[in-house]
Amino acid sequence: MRTNSFKYMVMSHIEENRSLYIFTTVLFLMGIIFGAIVVNSMSLTQRHDLHLYVSQFFGQVSEGHMTSSAEIFATSFMHYIKYIGLMWLLGLSVIGLPVLLILLFLKGVVVGFTIGFLVNQLGLQGFLLSFAAVMPQNFILIPVFIIIGTAGTAFCVKMMRQQFFKKQTVPFMPQFVRYSLLMLCLGGAVAFASFCEAYLSPILMKFIITTFM
């Protein structure tokens, strides 16, 4: 019974905010494309310096000289939870809405730039490394950022309608509680993404480096 109720709530949320989900997804994809384009606009010196840094990092991975997985997990989790926490907070105000969308776009830029740079510099090996180093956690994080971006935008739009157009359809507090509970649920997803980044990605990277490079 509870499972059906939860499924109904999820489907209702998606149906109600379908246009916003399309908008935030397109915005994120635009960020990925922009990040990949930025790689081609870098100077030769910048590419060389960054390539040297990346090569040193992957060299340390292959030799097993890495930060402990527990420390990587803690650092990653705190970074991601602060990021989506900031997005949640920005969704509570009209002024913060543009910044929330900018943060979503920038997250796409980071993903696009990372993958684009590795593929640009290392070809097929770079693609495999990006799949190992970037994608395990981002398979989870990308939906998380899109969901929090959509939920924040939807919440802000509802508050704008109530404040400026005086459409008092739903009380503020139930909407705020649902919005905050969503943030807590996404926190669990972020913890799993951080676990993948700390414990799964290093194993995959070491395997690819020792096998294909």
Image (cartoon, rainbow, N blue to C red):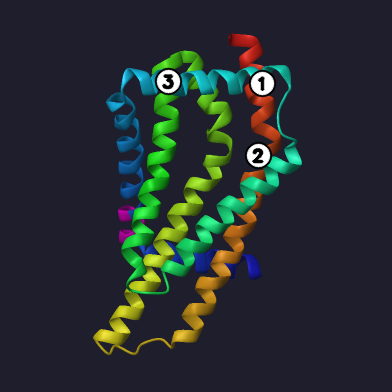
Label 1 or label 2, whichever lies nearer to me, is 1
Magenta residues? 18-23
Q: Is residue 173 left or right of residue 158?
A: right
In the rendered image of this protein, does residue 138 appear above or below residue 177?
Answer: above
For label 3, the residue is 119
- Mark 2: which amino acid? Cys
Indicate the quadrant containing the C terminus: top left, top right, bottom left or bottom right: top right
| Of callouts 1 and 3, the N-terminal one | 1
Disc 1 crowd rating (10 Å Cα; few below 14, some 14-19, many 20+) is: some
Q: Is residue 123 left or right of residue 97?
A: right
Q: Visible in this render: residue 37?
A: yes
Disc 2 crowd rating (10 Å Cα; few below 14, some 14-19, many 20+) is: many
Which is more toward the observer, 168 or 124? 124
Residue under the image location 68 percent in, 17 percent down: 62
- Mark 3: which amino acid? Val
Residue under the image location 31 percent in, 36 percent down: 33
Residue 165 is a magenta residue: no
Residue 21 is a magenta residue: yes
For label 1, the residue is 60
Q: Say what secondary structure mark 2 lies in.
A: helix
Task: Locate residue 65: give its quadrant.
Answer: top right
State the CA–CA distance, disc 2 to disc 3.
Answer: 22 Å
Q: Are marks 1 and 2 in contact (CB under 8 Å)?
A: no
Q: Position of residue 18 (x, y in %)?
A: 35, 60
| Of callouts 1 and 2, the N-terminal one | 1
Label 1 or label 3, whichever lies nearer to me, is 1
In the rendered image of this protein, does residue 59 appear above or below residue 89?
Answer: above
State the CA–CA distance, disc 1 to disc 2.
Answer: 19 Å
Q: Say what secondary structure mark 3 lies in.
A: helix
Say the numbered circle drawn on residue 196.
2
Disc 3 crowd rating (10 Å Cα; few below 14, some 14-19, many 20+) is: some
